[in-house]
């Protein structure tokens, strides 16, 4: 049994596929029979093309036509006579197939990279993918492909990156195990959005679990079991059924209003990472989008998405939500959110460094592309702009100034947008928690980002297992920060919501009701459970419990009292 972080609930039972980056190192060898070496290259090329075609065919239904077309494009490019001709000529000159492939493809890659046209520059990345694929065939090494997996696969991977998840064949994945990441890491957020049980930070998972092994992933408890005996398997099969039954029972809350037991209305919103996630949000009965993490658009791209691309993405969500509020957070880059092509310098202390709104305000021309796209999309629904990592009034003022500049430009161009678009703040730094009254004067709304707020308040890195014991919102320091923010927002008459993971913690629900929070924004699968939790408390009951909690000194005492009063 291996323990890790319970990152995405549910129980998955299936067969392990370890997705390790293949070792593609080789020692070049002399070629005596060039014809035989060329035949070897052609055979590898053929297998690569066949596999890629099959993958593209499968992706049409599992991922989407556009992604499938990219894969088919790889086949055409790999068979390009200019490329294959140059490789064969190199083999004729005495170079082995591996070396000829690497040298020639790198030359083509560099050529594409040096071109001004974006379409050609994207080709460079395609060439690199093709090189990896053919080289793996030549060397007889396996590249695990997450887009074509047999049903019931447990993916075991060092780290689940956004680009990997773009191709994941969700229907066939029973569970995910990674070697890195905490509950609020992006791997966890992605796994929850995909509703796949996941356990993260299992040390040496890629070594301990082997391809073909049966495994159980208990994403609720944070446990992975390899080769379970019959008794354990039966036990977990029953638990999986129970989990499914509880999920079915929550269906009673579908279509119901989100109200406390004494009828105070709340808003149940959803956190999303891509325009397509809006379908999951609606499937789970979300009333609004409380957080669209726009950085995923940037992470999944090969270069900065254009105004047009961003506009389409935001418009799609606004239209799908049919006039319900859609809070879109502007680019939250840096910290644990790396975007390779932006080439940000490595920093000693990235969580306190050049990131999020700091980066955006330092690059106003880039930022204005996003603000213009958001404004243009605001003509299609109730889009609100949210600014991440705010620490001072100056930042929100600077953003609002840029928004006004963009409005003036758009007006000049005769474009339509919502002139009254709201600009609000992620309340996720210790600084913001200390000046909520000052920030409330400048903001249309607050959304509490407890994932970061917990980290910055407790000075505990959210991805560092060794200080994980301090990373908890049950500490009085974090609870007081949350209370201060909510109460200051309520006093100022602005909407206060929460989009950090704590919004989905039913133990906290009575406290958030007591302090007057309006919007709960959670991952899609937590919506109905949170609606149920809200329905179980009256304001008076919540107030009574909150008063007792505020008298406690330690996280342990707080959690124990909340658990003792759980409904
Ligand atoms: C947060 O910090 O709570 C939050 C919602 O944002 P993210 O997890 O993307 O940093
Ligand atoms: Mg955050």
Image (tube, rainbow, N blue to C red):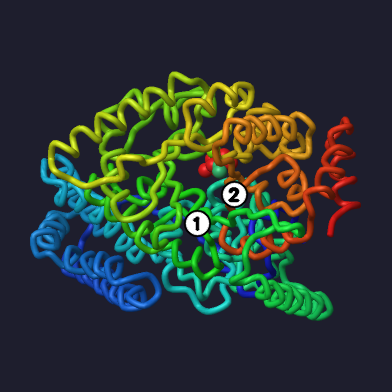
Residue nearest the observer in this picture, 439 or 148: 439
Give the residue at mark 2. 519
Q: Is mark 1 within 8 Å of ligand 1?
A: no
Are dots 1 and 2 in contact, CB under 8 Å? yes
What residue is drawn where x is 42% and y is 69%? Answer: 147
Give the left or right position of residue 245, taking residue 63 as reference: right
Residue nearest the observer in this picture, 385 or 148: 385
Q: Is residue 115 above or below residue 42?
A: above
Q: Secondary structure at mark 2?
A: strand
Q: Quadrant of residue 554?
A: top right
Q: CA distance from mark 1 to mark 2?
A: 9 Å
What residue is drawn where x is 25% and y is 35%? Answer: 407
Give the residue at mark 1. 288
Q: Is residue 27 above or below residue 567?
A: above
Percent across and percent down for residue 138 are: 32, 64
What residue is drawn where x is 55% and y is 52%? Answer: 187
């Amino acid at each position: 049994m291996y323990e890790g972080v319970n990152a995405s609930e549910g129980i998955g039972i299936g067969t392990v596929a370890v997705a390790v980056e293949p070792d593609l190192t080789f020692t070049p060898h002399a070629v005596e029979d060039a014809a035989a070496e060329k035949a070897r290259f052609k055979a590898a090329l053929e297998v690569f093309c066949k596999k890629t075609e099959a993958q593209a065919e499968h992706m049409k239904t599992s991922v989407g036509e556009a992604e499938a077309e990219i894969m088919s494009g790889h086949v055409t490019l790999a068979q390009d006579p200019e490329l294959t001709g140059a490789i064969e000529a190199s083999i004729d000159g005495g170079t082995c197939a591996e070396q000829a492939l690497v040298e020639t493809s790198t030359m083509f890659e560099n050529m594409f990279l040096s071109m001004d046209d974006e379409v050609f520059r994207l080709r460079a990345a395609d060439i690199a993918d093709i090189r990896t694929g053919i080289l793996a065939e030549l060397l007889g090494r396996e590249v695990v492909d997450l887009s074509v997996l047999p049903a019931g696969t447990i993916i075991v991977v060092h780290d689940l990156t956004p680009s990997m998840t773009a191709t994941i064949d969700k229907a066939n994945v029973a569970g995910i195990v990674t070697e890195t990441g905490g509950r609020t890491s992006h791997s966890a957020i992605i796994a929850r959005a995909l509703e796949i049980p996941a356990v993260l930070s299992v040390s040496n998972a890629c070594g301990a679990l082997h391809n073909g092994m049966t495994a159980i992933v208990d994403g609720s408890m944070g446990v992975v079991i390899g080769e379970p005996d019959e008794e354990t398997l039966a036990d977990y099969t029953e638990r999986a059924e129970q989990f499914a039954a509880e999920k079915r029972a929550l269906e009673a809350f579908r279509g119901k209003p989100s109200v406390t037991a004494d009828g105070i209305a709340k808003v149940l919103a959803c956190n999303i990472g891509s325009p397509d996630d809006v379908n999951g949000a609606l499937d789970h009965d979300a009333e609004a989008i409380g957080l669209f993490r726009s950085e995923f658009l940037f992470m999944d791209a090969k270069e900065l998405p254009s105004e047009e691309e961003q506009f389409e993405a935001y418009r799609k969500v606004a239209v799908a939500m049919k006039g319900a509020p859609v809070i879109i957070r502007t680019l939250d880059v840096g910290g644990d959110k790396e975007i390779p092509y932006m080439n940000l310098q490595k920093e000693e202390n990235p969580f306190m460094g050049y990131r999020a709104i700091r980066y955006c305000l330092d690059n106003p021309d880039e930022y204005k592309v996003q603000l213009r796209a958001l404004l243009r999309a605001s003509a299609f629904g109730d889009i609100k702009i949210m600014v991440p990592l705010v620490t001072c009034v100056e930042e929100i003022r600077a953003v609002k100034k840029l928004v006004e500049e963009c409005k003036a430009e758009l007006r000049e161009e005769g474009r339509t947008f919502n002139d009254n678009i709201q600009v609000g703040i992620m309340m996720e730094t210790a600084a913001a928690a200390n000046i909520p009254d000052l920030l409330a004067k400048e903001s249309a709304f607050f959304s509490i980002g407890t994932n970061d707020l917990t980290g910055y308040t407790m000075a505990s890195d959210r991805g560092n297992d060794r200080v994980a014991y301090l990373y908890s919102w049950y500490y009085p320091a974090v609870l007081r920060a949350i209370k201060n923010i909510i109460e200051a927002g309520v006093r100022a008459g602005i909407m206060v919501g929460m989009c950090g993971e704590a919004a989905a913690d039913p133990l906290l629900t009575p406290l958030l009701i007591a302090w007057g929070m309006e919007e709960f924004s959670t991952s899609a699968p937590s919506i109905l459970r949170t609606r149920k939790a809200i329905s179980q408390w009256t304001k008076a009951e919540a107030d009574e419990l909150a008063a007792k909690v505020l008298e406690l000194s330690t996280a342990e005492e707080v959690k124990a009292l909340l658990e003792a009063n759980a409904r």
